[in-house]
Image: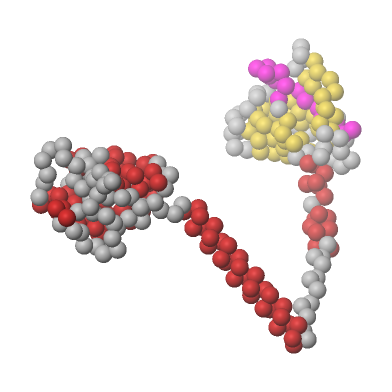
């Protein structure tokens, strides 16, 4: 039983579906607008930007689907040279290796070739490469055995460099595990104290996003009794062996205590008094 002839657009659509591709996939791969691909599959050449561009799109689309691009373009040229009555499907030639197309009067109905899935091709290639590598490996072992040479045992990776790298940054490793615990708060005075679990000094880094007046205490002793106003973009670091105290005039500042980000308490309130002491 003869199959019904199909148009160029239907031929493209069936080939695409057999490969389990969407029009979006094709558009992204070929950089052809989605509406032009839709026009090709619907044989709506009036929606394409001219015959020359349309035939170029057809050629690219056919090659991407592993179809006979030259035959399809030639068939399109025959269509516009000898148009069929409206509503009559224009039969396509059966795909041939030659780029020539039989006259329309002698054309057989198109049978869309079922392509091999791309994934199978890729899998076959991987298997072939694996077999070749296995053969080379066996041949190498044989040659080494015949000549009396044996591969040297693999050297164990040195462990000393790893130990040296860790020793260079004891502070970083220490900061990463330092716990910070809230010890006490007083909402009426907007003050809070924290315990910092460290055997080393307490270090507080301040980064300012706007003007902020700051007074600092190191081990309970103020280092700037009148305080100091810092501007946006500035930053300071305060360190002390036992405790660091801060009085912040605004909230335009972020704190990092011994390597850990510390949010400001008492949302919306200022000034704030904070104390970080070694535990």
Could you tell whether 124 is left or right of 180 in the image?
Answer: left
Q: Residue 207 vs residue 80: left or right?
A: right
Viewer-side residue, 64 vs 156 = 64
Closer to the camera in the image, 131 or 38: 131
Q: Write the residue at 80% across / 74% down.
A: 153
Is 7 rendered above or below residue 257? below
| Residue 54 visible in the picture | no
Q: In the image, residue 201 lies at what x, y percent?
A: 85, 40
For residue 52: magenta?
no
Q: Is residue 82 left or right of residue 204?
A: left
Considering every residue shown, the one lying at the far bottom of the view is: 147
Whether residue 182 is situated above or below residue 64 in the rendered picture: above
Q: Identify whether 21 is placed above or below 127.
A: above
Tell me the residue at 86%/35% (across/down). 197
Q: Residue at 32% x, 43% y: name it.
A: 13
**As rendered, which of 229 and 161 lies closer to the eye?**
161
Q: Is residue 31 left or right of residue 162?
A: left
Q: Quadrant of residue 59?
A: bottom left
In this rendering, does residue 251 appear at all?
A: yes
What residue occupies the far front of the structure in this picture? 1
- Residue depicted at 89% across the width and 33% down the height: 279
The answer to which quarter of the image holds residue 133 is: bottom right
| Magenta highlight range | 264-279
For residue 271, which quarter of the picture?
top right
Q: Give the camera-side residue of 1 and 183.
A: 1
């Amino acid at each position: 039983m003869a199959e019904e002839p199909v148009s160029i657009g239907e031929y493209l659509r069936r080939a695409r579906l057999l490969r389990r591709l969407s029009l979006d996939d094709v558009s992204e791969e070929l950089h052809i607008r989605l509406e032009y691909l839709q026009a090709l599959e619907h044989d709506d050449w009036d929606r394409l930007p001219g015959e020359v561009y349309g035939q170029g799109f057809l050629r690219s689309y056919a090659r991407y689907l592993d179809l006979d691009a030259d035959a399809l373009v030639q068939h399109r040229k025959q269509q516009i040279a000898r148009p069929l009555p409206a509503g009559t499907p224009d039969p396509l030639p059966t795909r041939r290796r030659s780029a020539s197309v039989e006259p329309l009067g002698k054309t057989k109905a198109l049978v869309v070739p079922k392509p091999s899935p791309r994934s199978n091709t890729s899998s076959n290639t991987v298997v072939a490469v694996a077999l070749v590598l296995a053969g080379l490996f066996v041949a190498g072992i044989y040659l080494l055995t015949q000549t009396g040479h044996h591969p040297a045992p693999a050297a164990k990776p040195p462990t000393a460099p790893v130990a040296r790298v860790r020793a260079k940054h004891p502070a970083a490793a220490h900061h990463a595990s330092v716990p910070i615990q809230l010890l006490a708060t007083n909402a009426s005075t907007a003050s809070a104290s924290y315990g910092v679990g460290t055997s080393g000094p307490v270090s507080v880094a301040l980064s300012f996003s706007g003007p902020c007046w700051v007074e600092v205490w190191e081990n309970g002793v103020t280092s700037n009794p009148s305080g100091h106003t810092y501007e946006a973009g500035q930053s300071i670091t305060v360190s002390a062996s036992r405790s660091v105290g801060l009085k912040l005039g605004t909230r335009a500042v972020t704190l990092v205590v011994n390597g850990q980000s510390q949010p400001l308490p008492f949302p919306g309130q200022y000034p704030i008094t904070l104390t970080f002491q070694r535990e």
